[in-house]
Amino acid sequence: MHASVRQLLARAAEAADEESGKNPFDSITHGDPEKNEYLKRLIGGILEGRIISASYNLFVLVAIVLLSVLHLYRTHRDRRKWRVRVSRDSALEGKRGPGVLQTMNDREGESSSSSTLVGGDETPLDTALDTKQTDLDLEERPLLRSKRYRGIWRPIWGVKAWLAYQPQPLPIINRQLPANGTSVFVLAWLGLNVFLHLYRLPMETKYFFIFADRCGCMFIVNLPLLYLLSAKTQPLRVLTGRSYEALNIFHRRIGEMLCLLGVVHWGSMLIWRFCFEPDWLLRGDTPRTYLFHPLILEGFGALLSYELLYFTSLSTFRQRWYEVFLASHVILQVLALVFLWFHFYTSRPYVLISLAIFLIDRLVWRLTLKSFTTTASLSILEDGETLLLSADWDIPSTPTSKLRSLFQHNIQRGWSPTDHVFLTIPALGREHALQSHPFTIASAAPPIPSWDPSSTATSRPPHAWLSLLIRSYNGFTASLLHHALLHPSLPLQIRLDGPYGSPHALSLLRASSTAVLIAGGSGIAVIYPLAEALLLHGPTGGQKVKLLWVIHSESHRRWIPEQRLEELREMGAEVVVSEPTGLAGRPDVGGFIRGWVDDDVEGEVGVVCSGPDGLNRGVRNTCAREIGRGRRVRIAVEKFGW
């Protein structure tokens, strides 16, 4: 709280103790009724504002509960769809003869069953390209069940299509925008903060201090959520089905709002002190005394720490000086919380919660429970800029409980498709010994037996093979490339923190009758494990699997061995690797998607994409247009880069 008002309350309390039965403000106002009434309204507004601000946590709790219920519903629906399709395929296979039983790869709680893996002919490249040209009039083809069904639900499909659509980047600053659905959610959250900030706020300059104080209160109540969303191991993943990297956009918007609130709070306090504070409240307080008051200096220290955090978190800074970003995030966060602790007494419960989240995530989980040390080999691929880091180890045979695995499961026991790890290599030097860098796991996930009692698997796989594709840019990756050039055959001692990820993409694909996977460049590190999980480690239920890999140069084909792609083709997948875009230009990715969607009019198509921003946006918007046409299409974009 502002120094003069904080001292005012202290003096009022002392006056009430010394002169029982008298107005506690008389010692300040000298018995002036008008001034007494003003102080009552001022202090009452401050206390009321803090109650209103604290209610923000109830709104957040309600939102989390609703998202959890939605996640449970979607998970149950996806499991049911998968079971129905697999059961139907098993029944048909049973009439033809015995099938091949395989275990479903599902660490995250997906259901398991047994079925014959259904093969299929690979669709030629020219057929996929010409689908939209040789097809009949698409408007005359049946959508879903009937034209009447389509007409009734047309407005809903239009809304769903708009929510799935991703606008073009903002001009001049080239700022990427999320899908409209995400933007609506973020705007709703911002609206809640603005509403709580302005609710029952006196709109008179003489009560301007209440506005300034409310800024600080809204800053504080958002603090635990900011730290919760930044934690790598968090309950929100279990409750909502989204891991921290999917929620990172919300974490950044909260951080940006808090930086704005901090500036507004600081500026408003200066405006109050030098423009609107009544002279009789100053009590001889000079500008110098005010600016160098410990309370003001502590507040300025917290403000400066968080503003520097924001500056070092900008994508341009983060990509160029990632190591500085990592170190500053740890140091500045601790400093900011210490300054807040002393600056604002009411903030202390929120500061303690935030600090506990930060320390438990960093020290308990990431450096101990989620950490695993092993030996790896390093090789340079054909393009001379991409590294392949490989490691393997025996998977422990001792099973862990489902509840324990949610928080204590580390990479030693396996991982799931789309998971990533944080890599630390002490051998690169002292500056890299405490740094951890995220990389998506490019190798197939080892099949882990399902919790489903009908599963035929009784033991864990004996061995795990892990591969990371690492593109060399600067900093850590440049040092790693230099090390590989100097020591091409020297084993490396590495520390892996993870795995981290979400089962959302795999669940979406398994619930679909047609699974479409789009990879751009090194996005194949995300897409290939998904394709293998669908085809090799689980019953397909007659599912069609389509994979398109867009590469920039011929050397990028070596990132995934050709025999691995042939295995997918042999299992019935349609695998298309584009001509290098550096030579032939960009392929018509939208044409592929439209053709594959048109091939499955009655079923549901699940699309997962991982690649550069332009490719992701194009795939998302193609799917949005198909949704607008009444097609049952679901889209998930896996994060590409950090």
Image (cartoon, grey):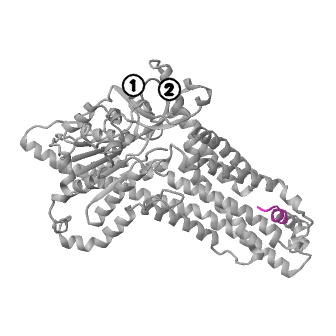
In front: 8, or 595? Answer: 595
Question: The residue under label 1 is which amino acid type?
Answer: Asp
In the picture of the structure, the residue carrying the numbered disc 1 is 392
Provide the secondary structure element on which disc 1 rests: strand
Image height of 107 relative to 45, above or below: above
Image height of 529 relative to 542, above or below: above
Q: Tell me the distance, in whole angstroms, between the alpha carbons under discs 2 and 1.
A: 12 Å
Residue at 26%, 66% (x, y): give it: 630
Image height of 294 relative to 422, above or below: below
User: Mark 1: few, some, or many residues within 10 Å (few <14, many ≥20)?
Assistant: some
Residue 518: image location, x then y, percent? 32, 47
- Looking at this rendering, what residue extends furthest in the front direction? 583
**What kind of secondary structure does the magenta stretch mostly adopt?**
helix
Question: The residue under label 2 is which amino acid type?
Answer: Ile
Question: Total marks drawn?
Answer: 2
Q: Is residue 106 part of the magenta span, yes or no? A: no
Of the image marks 2 and 1, the number of the one nearer the N terminus: 1
Residue 487: image location, x then y, percent? 49, 19
* Quadrant of residue 594 within the rendered picture: bottom left
Quadrant the N terminus occupies: bottom right
* Quadrant of residue 14 within the rendered picture: bottom right
* Quadrant of residue 628 within the rendered picture: bottom left
Residue 639: image location, x then y, percent? 43, 47
In the picture of the structure, the residue carrying the numbered disc 2 is 494
The span picked out in magenta is 1-8
Do callouts 2 and 1 mark residues in contact (Cβ within 8 Å)?
A: no
